[in-house]
Image (spheres, rainbow, N blue to C red):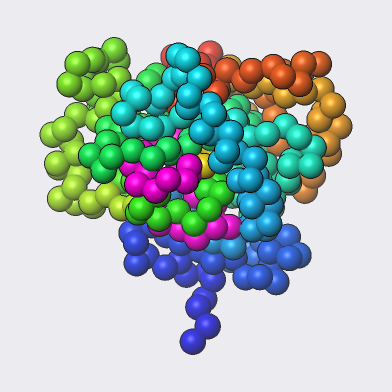
């Protein structure tokens, strides 16, 4: 039986859409598939688009980033998200022209989805990656959302996660909590700067127990070539990588243009023409880049925590 690509599979609790190979090759997003993906993204706060990226592009990126991850982890003073024991570091995608793939940075199935959800000309505010290094089985992040500021109760920001390899339970598939994007930051934490047994941005344990009885969390076990699109407000947690190979998952944070986000990241000026051609494609968008002549410039996202407080905005006081 041929699976209907318009109706997602829900066997793992996440709406999963399989992009037909003919559509991927042509770069055409059938309107019915787009409409269905938007519907489920609104309801669940997370969807998966399978067969959305050329696997060879992911292999090329992984050949560079996986060895680099091991070196980065050994640098003195290296920052780990939620502590060294989690084995989770930020790792920016390379800025080598040979590794700048449009189906990674501006995917033809992701961009129409973002424009439909966020409005015209969405803005790429943050380009990094979450790399899970080998850790013991009892090390994981607390359940959290990536927000620590006032925000609306409707979509204003989406995270596009792209694992470079098959993402499995063994190598630390992301834990997500479908439907948890419907509440606000103020409802989920005890206080903005909480510490001790309850880290910053960690969800109140009582809320976790209540939500688990309604809709338990699931692991985003997806094959290479998949893209995970999730609402920035969604509860999630990084899980331990039990293998010896770093599991790299790129993370692109997009926001609505009207949100007027303050986030930015550095890119070499030699890429400006290429990225401008992408920005003015079928779906127009903007990249919040600060252009630099220094190819070796360190991107702040590589050393900072994964919270997006720096993306707070002048309009947040309205919510």
Residue 238 % position (x, y): 36, 39
Please tell me which residue is depicted at 23% across the width and 52% down the height of the picture.
215
Which is more toward the observer, 237 or 315? Answer: 237
Tell whether 73 sits left or right of 216.
Answer: right
Residue 246 % position (x, y): 48, 42
Please tell me which residue is depicted at 23% across the width and 15% down the height of the picture.
195
Q: Quadrant of residue 26?
A: bottom right
On screen, residue 26 above or below 155: below
Tell whether 103 sits left or right of 39.
Answer: right
| Main SS class of the magenta portion in the image | loop
Span of residues in magenta: 220-247
On screen, residue 310 above or below 172: above
Please tell me which residue is depicted at 23% across the width and 51% down the height of the picture.
216
Tell whether 318 sits left or right of 62.
Answer: left
Q: Quadrant of residue 88?
A: top left
Regarding residue 143, the answer to whether it shows in the image is no
Residue 257 % position (x, y): 62, 29
Going by the picture, which residue comes out furthest to the bottom? 1
Which is more toward the observer, 60 or 311? Answer: 60
Please tell me which residue is depicted at 15% across the width and 42% down the height of the picture.
210
> Does the magenta run of residues contain 231?
yes
């Amino acid at each position: 039986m041929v699976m209907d690509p318009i109706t997602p599979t829900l066997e793992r609790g996440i709406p999963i859409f399989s992009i037909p190979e003919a559509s991927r090759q042509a770069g055409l997003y059938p309107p019915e598939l787009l409409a269905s993906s938007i519907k489920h993204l609104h309801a669940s706060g997370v969807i998966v688009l399978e067969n959305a990226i050329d696997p060879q592009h992911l292999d090329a990126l992984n050949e560079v980033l996986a060895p680099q991850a091991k070196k980065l982890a050994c640098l003195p003073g290296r920052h780990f998200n939620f502590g060294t024991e989690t084995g989770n570091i930020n790792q920016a995608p390379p800025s080598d022209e040979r590794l700048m793939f449009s189906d990674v940075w501006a995917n033809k199935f992701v961009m129409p989805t973002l424009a439909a959800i966020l409005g015209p000309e969405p803005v790429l505010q943050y380009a990094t990656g979450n790399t899970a290094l080998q850790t013991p089985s009892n090390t994981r992040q607390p359940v959290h959302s990536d927000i620590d500021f006032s925000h609306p109760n409707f979509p204003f920001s989406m995270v596009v996660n792209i694992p470079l390899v098959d993402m499995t339970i063994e190598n630390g598939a992301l834990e997500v909590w479908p439907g948890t994007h419907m509440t606000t930051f103020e409802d989920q934490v005890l206080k903005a700067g909480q510490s001790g047994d309850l880290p910053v941005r960690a969800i109140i344990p009582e809320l976790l127990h209540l939500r688990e009885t309604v809709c338990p969390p699931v692991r985003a076990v997806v094959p290479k070539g998949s893209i995970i699109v999730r609402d920035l407000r969604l509860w999630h947690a990084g899980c331990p990588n039990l293998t010896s190979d770093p599991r790299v998952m790129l993370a692109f944070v997009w926001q609505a243009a009207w949100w007027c986000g303050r986030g930015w990241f550095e890119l070499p000026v030699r890429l400006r023409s290429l990225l401008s051609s992408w920005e003015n494609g079928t779906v127009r968008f903007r990249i919040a880049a600060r252009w630099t002549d220094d190819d070796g410039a360190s991107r702040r996202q590589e050393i900072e925590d994964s919270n997006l407080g720096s993306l707070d905005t002048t309009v947040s006081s309205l919510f």
